[in-house]
Amino acid sequence: MLPNLDPLLQTQLRLQIVTLLAGVDDAEFNWLLENTGATRGNLSVQINKLKDAGYVKVEKGFKNNYPLTTCQITSKGRKAFEEYVAAITKYINHQQK
Amino acid sequence: MLPNLDPLLQTQLRLQIVTLLAGVDDAEFNWLLENTGATRGNLSVQINKLKDAGYVKVEKGFKNNYPLTTCQITSKGRKAFEEYVAAITKYINHQQK
DNA sequence: TAGACTAGTTTATGTTATAAACAAGTTTAC
DNA sequence: GTAAACTTGTTTATAACATAAACTAGTCTA
């Protein structure tokens, strides 16, 4: 039986966010915006879902007087991503004999 | 930028169906039921969505007097699956320098 | 011939993803 | 100095979606 996939990582945008964050130390809101192509509203919502799940840490500050949101993947988030990769790999490699 | 993922293949059940069908000549409804763990209702709905999209061909007949639904992946479905695999592979292998 | 079973389909519902609208402050132009 | 435009997000309204429960249509069994 094919393995279950983490529901949180089944939407493109959340998977993009986690994938991107897995490759950097941290990322600003606008950097994620550019690299995902999402709208601000959608990005905000999905970051918060990942935050609520404990997959990302969010820090709020200021830069040049403007609000600045910085995101970082947590160890829980990294583990979830790695498990997702392991699971989806089984789909990719699945072949009946 | 990470590539887009086919929305039809972003739910676990539909991805399971297409993955399973990609590995066999054809499959009966009950075989899909067992191999996905889905409910009949959900399986019926999702097969029909894949049929509407032209990803699977559905044939209805009888076996031992009972209705029998047989599914087969189409070339369009196989192509979509291969493109999905190519896209998700870029997520899996994504790393910032 | 009544009850239980098979093989699905339809529908009712709750959840979810998303964009549009909004908020709160900053910079610019006059 | 103040109105207009811009920045950086958040909240909300809506439409789409996934899912299980309820239903349908027919078959077997006792």
Image (cartoon, coloured by chain):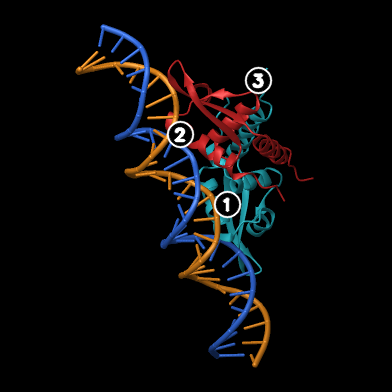
Chain colours: A cyan, B red, C orange, D blue
Q: Give the image quarter of residue C15.
A: top left
Residue B39 image point, x, y percent: 44, 29
Q: Are marks 1 and 3 in contact (CB under 8 Å)?
A: no
Please tell me if label 1 and label 3 are on a single chain: yes
Q: Residues within 10 Å of mark 2 (few under 14, many from 20)?
A: few
Which sits earlier in the primary sequence, circle 1 or circle 3?
A: 1
Q: Are marks 2 and 3 in contact (CB under 8 Å)?
A: no
State the CA–CA distance, disc 1 to disc 3.
Answer: 43 Å
* Quarter where residue A68 is shown: bottom right
Q: Where residue D4 appears, x then y in whole percent?
A: 58, 84
Amino acid type, residue under disc 3 in the picture: Gln
Name of the residue lying farthest toward the right = B97
User: Where does label 2 land, which residue?
Assistant: B42
Left or right: B43, with A31 as reference point: left
Q: Chain of mark 3?
A: A
Mark 2: secondary structure: helix
Is the residue marked by circle 1 packed among few (<14), some (14-19), or many (20+) residues within 10 Å? many
3D distance between C-alphas at marks 2 and 3: 24 Å
Q: Which residue is mark 3?
A: A96
Q: Which residue is mark 1?
A: A58
